[in-house]
Image: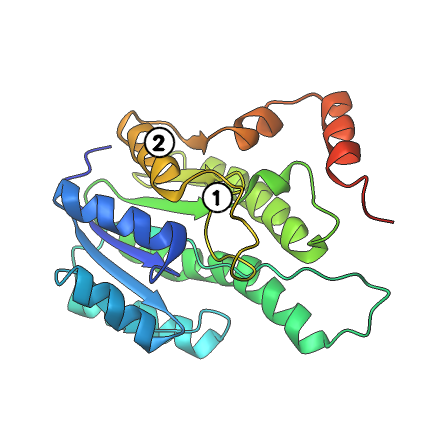
């Protein structure tokens, strides 16, 4: 994939993996649009990288997803890459008192939103040069972390959806890619929870290299292992990873 001549929309692009990818696409010469829920973070990102285009959008809300489509395609008609990156990770046990609204928001943000945004943007992308949809899943799509049960399940669902979408669009110009992160040192789920993860810059550099090389499933470290593991290996990884939980 040529990284220098795209117009790219990244959801959840104000921090973490989304912003790291935005920075690298900008450096490569592409035009980059990012959206997120918090305006102050978007403005901080734009202050650091003035060429970024920003839009406040909560992708868990259907109306805001439609507004995002209309803004992006009208203001940037050459938009040719959609990166579904926005995600929420909550850690809890179902024996606790849970607020359904928070669980539902996690499901909608992590799975419903990428499916709907893909549906919304496909008609536009079909008219573009070198179009692509890139879904960000997780190594936990293959071996779930029991401490984040809904996050793991939504990423497994998004992985499955990505395979089907790639097959359905195989005879169109739209390429469907999947980025499968391991634990990365970001603020996903809360500050300090992923400090032992892969350094963000290291991971983002590896992702960009694999995209440039034409890979469709982009893995790194732990996620490279789990995405290729046998059922027996996955069972063993799951057991080790979750042995401290009841």
Residue 239 visible? The answer is yes
Q: Is residue 144 above or below residue 22?
A: above
Residue at x 76%, y 32% (from the top left corner): 240
Give the CA distance from mark 2 to mark 1: 12 Å
- Numbered disc 1: secondary structure: loop
Whether label 2 touches label 1, CB < 8 Å = no
Name the image quarter holding the N terminus.
top left
User: Which of 160/26 is in front?
Assistant: 26
Q: Is residue 101 above or below residue 152?
A: below
x, y percent for residue 120? 39, 62
| Residue that badge 1 annotates | 184
| Residue that badge 2 annotates | 206
Residue at x 62%, y 63% (from the top left corner): 107
Q: Quadrant of residue 213?
A: top left
Residue 5 visible? The answer is no
x, y percent for residue 204? 34, 40
Q: Nearer the viewer, mark 2 or mark 1?
A: 1
């Amino acid at each position: 994939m040529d990284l220098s001549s795209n117009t790219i929309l990244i959801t959840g692009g104000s921090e973490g993996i989304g912003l790291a990818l935005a920075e690298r696409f900008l450096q490569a010469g592409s035009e980059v649009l990012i959206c997120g829920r918090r305006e102050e973070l978007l403005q901080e990102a734009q202050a650091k990288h003035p060429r970024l285009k920003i839009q406040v959008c909560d992708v868990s809300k259907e109306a805001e997803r439609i507004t995002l489509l209309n803004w992006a395609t009208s203001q940037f008609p050459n938009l040719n890459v959609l990166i579904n990156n926005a995600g929420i990770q909550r850690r809890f046990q179902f024996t606790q008192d849970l607020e359904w609204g928070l669980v539902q928001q996690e499901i909608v943000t992590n799975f419903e939103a990428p499916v709907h945004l893909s549906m919304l943007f496909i008609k536009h992308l079909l008219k573009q040069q070198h179009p692509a949809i890139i879904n960000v899943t997780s190594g936990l799509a293959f071996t779930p972390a029991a401490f984040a049960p809904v996050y793991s399940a939504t990423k497994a669902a998004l992985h499955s959806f990505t395979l089907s979408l790639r097959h359905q669009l195989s005879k169109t110009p739209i390429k469907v890619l999947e980025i499968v992160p391991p634990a990365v040192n970001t603020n996903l789920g809360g500050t300090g929870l992923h400090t032992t993860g892969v350094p963000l810059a290291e991971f983002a550099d590896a992702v960009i290299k694999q995209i440039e090389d034409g890979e469709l499933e982009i893995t790194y470290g732990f996620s490279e292992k789990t995405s290729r593991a046998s059922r027996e290996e996955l069972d063993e990884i799951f057991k080790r990873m979750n042995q401290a939980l009841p």
